[in-house]
Image (cartoon, rainbow, N blue to C red):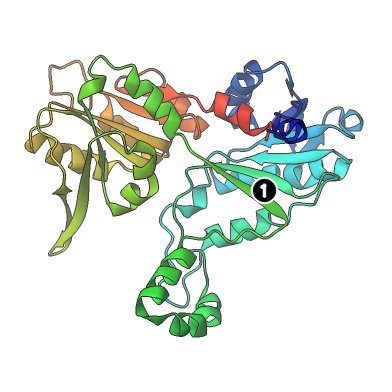
């Protein structure tokens, strides 16, 4: 190969990164900084005025000019989003060389559907807000998000805009285009979204299991299969499905054979955990020797993680392992080291993403 081409293909010099973070993400930020001496933590004074509005101060702001800057965010509740957005919009204006926003979990996209006029997709609103982050000296903001939920972020007027295009595609083409548009995330060209995944962490952990050769991956629905099956295609697979019987939605085995295997249910996020529990029952009923679970984002509102905790009363332990990442810091602190939970940290992956 030509020497000049080889030089072009060589890995560029790594950047020195100044990493700011919100209070919730301090533990994860410290783990990210431990991955590389090129990542230096920076601090912000997160204060409030007497009326409750943020009184924020970016420490050493005069020294970050010309530097590569990143911010590790956690939008765990509406109460903390405004103060973080204030910092996110301020940092690129400080004449930084580049700006990267790391938002491991994009929270507003969990259950949103735009099925009729009048539905309000707050995820679409959040995408538009983030799309308007000021451009730094180095160009648009890089936005790092992990295993984003497939969202229907297109509005009624967006449907009308593409309606004539659907008609010109024929039946099959129209459906394909429709599905593509439904799952698109409408960030503007002012940001560069980098969609990462926690699946490599899961694969590494599965290979460490004593029964690694007996692992079968299960998906709770077709959506999870579409999202992850290509990354896990060297494992045998089982797919479940939710079917409606009267007023109830029941989980059924759709395809695959879990009998005698250690079955690992894989999904992007968990809320109450009801679907995972129903999947476990179905898989056990079809002969699975063990059932574990992996989700990238453990939201667990109202302490719903307690449903999965192993009790010391001799009762059956439904889940052998429950793996999750540290994308939701409040959940990580809540579940601690309680079995069956194990935290697979995104720190190494985030450190790598900051060098892109």
Q: Can you see residue 239?
A: yes
Q: Residue at x 37, y 22 (%)?
A: 205
Residue 84 appears left or right of 324: right
Q: Nearer the viewer, residue 92 or 331?
A: 92
Q: Quadrant of residue 300?
A: top left
Residue 99: x and y, percent?
A: 76, 40
Residue 158: x and y, percent?
A: 55, 75
Q: Which residue is mark 1?
A: 82
Please tell me whether residue 120 is drawn above or below residue 95 in the rendered image: below
Q: Residue at x 9, y 33 (%)?
A: 259
Q: Quadrant of residue 98?
A: top right
Instruction: Give the mark count.
Output: 1
Residue 229 appears left or right of 114: left
Q: Which of the image's four quarters has the N terminus?
A: top right
Q: Nearer the viewer, residue 205 or 82?
A: 205
Question: Which secondary structure lies at badge 1?
Answer: helix
Farthest-out residue, front: 1
Q: Residue at x 46, y 71 (%)?
A: 119
Residue 209: x and y, percent?
A: 29, 17
Please tell me whether residue 292 is drawn above or below residue 192 in the rendered image: above
Q: Can you see residue 43?
A: no
């Amino acid at each position: 190969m030509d020497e000049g081409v080889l030089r072009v293909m060589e890995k560029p010099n790594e950047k020195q990164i100044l990493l700011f973070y919100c209070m919730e993400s301090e533990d994860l930020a410290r783990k990210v900084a431990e991955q590389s001496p090129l990542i230096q933590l920076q601090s912000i004074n997160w204060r409030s005025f007497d009326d409750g509005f943020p009184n924020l101060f970016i420490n050493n702001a005069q020294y970050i000019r010309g530097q590569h800057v990143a911010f590790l965010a956690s939008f765990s509740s509406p109460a903390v989003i405004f103060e973080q957005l204030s910092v996110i919009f301020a940092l690129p204006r400080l004449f930084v060389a580049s700006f990267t926003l790391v938002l491991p979990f994009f929270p507003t996209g969990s259950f949103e559907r735009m099925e009729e006029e009048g539905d309000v997709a707050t995820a679409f609103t959040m995408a538009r807000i983030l799309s308007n982050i000021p451009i730094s000296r180095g160009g648009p903001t890089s936005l790092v998000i992990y295993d984003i939920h497939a969202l229907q972020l297109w509005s009624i007027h967006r449907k009308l805009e593409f309606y004539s295009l659907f008609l010109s595609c024929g039946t099959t083409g129209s459906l394909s285009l429709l599905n593509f548009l439904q799952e698109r995330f409408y960030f503007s060209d002012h940001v560069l979204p980098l969609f990462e995944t926690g699946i490599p962490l899961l694969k590494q952990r599965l290979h460490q299991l004593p029964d690694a050769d007996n692992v079968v991956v299960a998906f709770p629905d077709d959506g999870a299969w579409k999202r992850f099956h290509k990354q896990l295609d060297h494992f045998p697979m089982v797919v479940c499905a939710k079917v409606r019987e009267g007023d109830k939605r029941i989980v059924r085995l759709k395809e695959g054979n879990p009998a005698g295997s250690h079955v690992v249910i894989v999904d992007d996020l968990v809320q109450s955990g009801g679907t995972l529990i129903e999947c476990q029952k179905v898989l056990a009923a079809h002969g699975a020797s063990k059932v574990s679970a992996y989700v990238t984002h453990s939201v667990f509102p109202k302490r719903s993680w307690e449903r999965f905790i192993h009790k010391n009363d001799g009762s059956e332990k439904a889940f052998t392992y429950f793996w999750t990442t540290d994308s939701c810091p409040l959940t990580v602190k809540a579940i601690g080291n309680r079995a069956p939970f194990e935290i697979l940290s995104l720190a190494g992956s985030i450190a790598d993403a900051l060098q892109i």
